[in-house]
């Protein structure tokens, strides 16, 4: 049986898919990307044609994962802020459970210390922070303390998603409600002059 020749895009996707599983199962320093070439049945030279270094390979892997996550968690900006929050968190957690290898690889990227990877992670954090701020305080520059609260919450949700992978008996709905409750608590703890313009909608008043 003749093996079908893959297009460049298909080959790149195949290599990233295989690398995703490797980086999900072992710390960054213990992964040898030459193993990806072996699993794909291609030469190391071909692998390095697509990804010249381990660093560029892993950065591409994390970048692909964050792009897919951003797309999967989009919400309707015309909906009330709390509805956007609930839907966004639920979609995030569902995406995590549906893509465990990508999620674990992403978290290993956070811990890798690689400057390029850290920049991709920072961009992802900023995207979700901006989404939340647009939903709750769309018409003004947010106070720095509000920004701290939102960034803290984004990191909390990310950590909760990682924990969800290790706790199969816990449901998406349970973690979603926990995350939403934490957000309400953070916003409620802000001084009056810092609270977002739509605070009453967020706090259910």
Image (tube, rainbow, N blue to C red):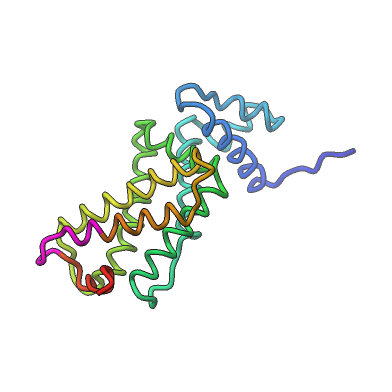
Quadrant placement of the N terminus: top right
Q: Is residue 170 left or right of residue 159?
A: right
Is 149 contained in the magenta span? no
In x, y percent, where is residue 185?
24, 57
Q: Is residue 55 left or right of residue 118?
A: right
Give the answer, above or below, for where 62 lies relative to 149. above
Is 191 contained in the magenta span? yes
Q: Specify the quadrant of the image occupied by residue 198.
A: bottom left
In x, y percent, where is residue 91?
48, 59
Q: Which residues are magenta?
A: 185-194
Q: Specify the quadrant of the image occupied by residue 119.
A: top left
Q: Residue at x 45, y 40 (%)?
A: 106
Residue ranking furthest to the right? 1
Q: Nearer the viewer, residue 138 or 5?
A: 138
Q: Residue at x 49, y 21 (%)?
A: 30
Q: Nearer the viewer, residue 139 or 149?
A: 149
Q: Is residue 9 left or right of residue 148?
A: right
Q: Residue at x 82, y 39 (%)?
A: 3
Give the answer, above or below, for where 187 lies relative to 56. below
Give the answer, above or below, for where 117 lies relative to 77. above
Count of numbered marks = 0
In x, y percent, where is residue 75?
44, 68
In x, y percent, where is residue 68?
51, 54
Residue ranking furthest to the top? 30
* Magenta span: chief secondary structure: loop
Quadrant placement of the C terminus: bottom left
């Amino acid at each position: 049986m003749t093996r079908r020749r893959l297009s460049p895009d298909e080959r790149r996707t195949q290599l990233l898919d295989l690398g995703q599983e490797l980086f999900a199962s072992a710390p960054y320093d213990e992964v040898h990307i030459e193993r990806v070439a072996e699993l794909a049945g291609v030469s190391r030279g071909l692998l390095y044609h697509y990804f010249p270094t381990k660093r560029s390979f892993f950065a591409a892997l994390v970048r692909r994962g964050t792009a897919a996550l951003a797309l999967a968690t989009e919400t309707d900006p015309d909906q009330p802020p709390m509805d956007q929050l609930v839907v966004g968190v639920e979609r995030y957690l569902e995406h995590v459970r549906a893509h465990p290898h990508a999620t674990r690889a992403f978290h290993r990227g956070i811990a890798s210390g690689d400057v390029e990877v850290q920049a991709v992670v920072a961009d992802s954090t900023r995207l979700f922070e901006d989404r939340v701020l647009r939903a709750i305080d769309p018409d003004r520059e947010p106070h720095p303390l509000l920004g701290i609260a939102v960034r803290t919450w984004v990191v909390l949700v990310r950590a909760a998603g990682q924990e969800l992978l290790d706790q199969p008996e816990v449901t998406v709905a349970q973690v979603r409600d926990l995350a939403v409750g934490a957000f309400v608590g953070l916003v409620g703890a802000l001084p009056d002059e810092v609270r977002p313009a739509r605070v009453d909608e967020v706090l259910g008043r």
